Amino acid sequence: MAANLDLIIKGNIITVVNQKPRAEAIGVKGGKIISVGSGSEVEQGVGKATRVLDLKGKTVLPGFIDSHAHPMGTGKNRLGVDLSSVKTVREALEKIKQRVAKTPPGKLVFCPEFNRQHVTEKRYPSKKELDAISTKHPIWIQHYDGHFSQINSMAIELLHLKAGMEGVITDAGGELTGLIQDPASARPLSDGDNYSDKNEAMEALMLVTKKRLRSASLPSLPKRAWKTPHSS
C-alpha cells in the first residue's frame, strides 16, 4: 500500500468492481484514490499528516457523471392522479372524477402513468368521456412513456391544437380525438419539471424524497408492451 496518505476514508465502500465489490477503507493522496481495501491494509499508508475520516458505517459510492434523474418531474407525477394500476377505462375515469371533485375549476388535473395495454379495453379514455367528467378543468392523461397523451376539450383549447398539426390525431371525419403525440406534446399544459407554485414544488420534492428514503429496495416494475399507443 502507498505510504504517507493525505486522507483515509473508512466506511461501507461500494467499488462497483466485480473482483472486490466492497471495501472498508479508501486511501487518498494528491487528490486521487490510490488504495482501496480493508481498514488494516489501507492504514499501512498512514503518515504524520494523514487525516482519517470515519463514516461510522455509512456508504460511499463512486461518482456518477449523469444518472439522468428527474426528481421534480417524479414529484409532479406523485402529485397527480396515478393511473399506473388501473385495469379498466371505467376505473381510470372514476379516479379522475374523484380528483376533479376536489380541484378548483381551471386548475389542471394531471393523470400520469396510464398504459392502455394494461386496461381491459386496450384504449385510452375518450375525449367525450373526459368531457363528461369536466369541461371546466383541463384534463391530461399521460402515457407512461411520456410521449403520448389523451386530453379533454378544454385542454385542446388551451393548447390551441388544430387538425393538421404534427402529432395531433384525428378521427375519420377529421375531428380531433384528444390524443396527441410528439411533437404535439401536452407538456405546455404544465411548467415541465419547473414549478410556479413554491409550496407545490416543496410538496412534490418531499413526496419523491420520502418515497426514496422508505424504499430499502427497488419495487418490481410491471412488464410493459412497447407498442405505439393509438386511439380507440
Image: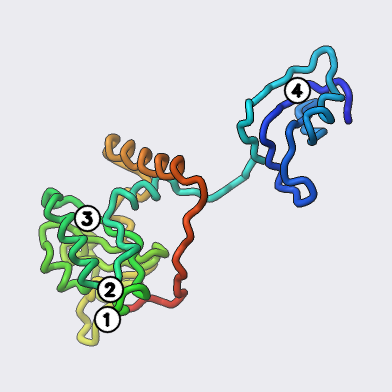
Considering only order in the chain, which callout, 4 or 2, is on the residue closer to the N terminus?
4
* CA–CA distance in space, label 1 to label 4: 63 Å
Which residue type carries mark 3?
Val
Q: Which residue is mark 3?
A: 109
Left or right, 151 with respect to 47, comes to left
Q: Quadrant of the C terminus?
A: bottom left
The image shows residue 53 at horizontal and vertical percentages of: 69, 22
Q: Secondary structure at mark 1?
A: loop
Left or right, 52 with respect to 183, comes to right
Q: Which residue is mark 2?
A: 124
Crowdedness of circle 4 by 10 Å Cα count: few (<14), some, many (20+)?
Answer: many
Which residue type carries mark 4?
Leu
Q: Is residue 166 visible?
A: no
Q: Which residue is mark 4?
A: 7
Considering only order in the chain, which callout, 4 or 1, is on the residue closer to the N terminus?
4
Q: Residue furthest top?
A: 48
Q: Residue at x 11, y 68 (%)?
A: 132
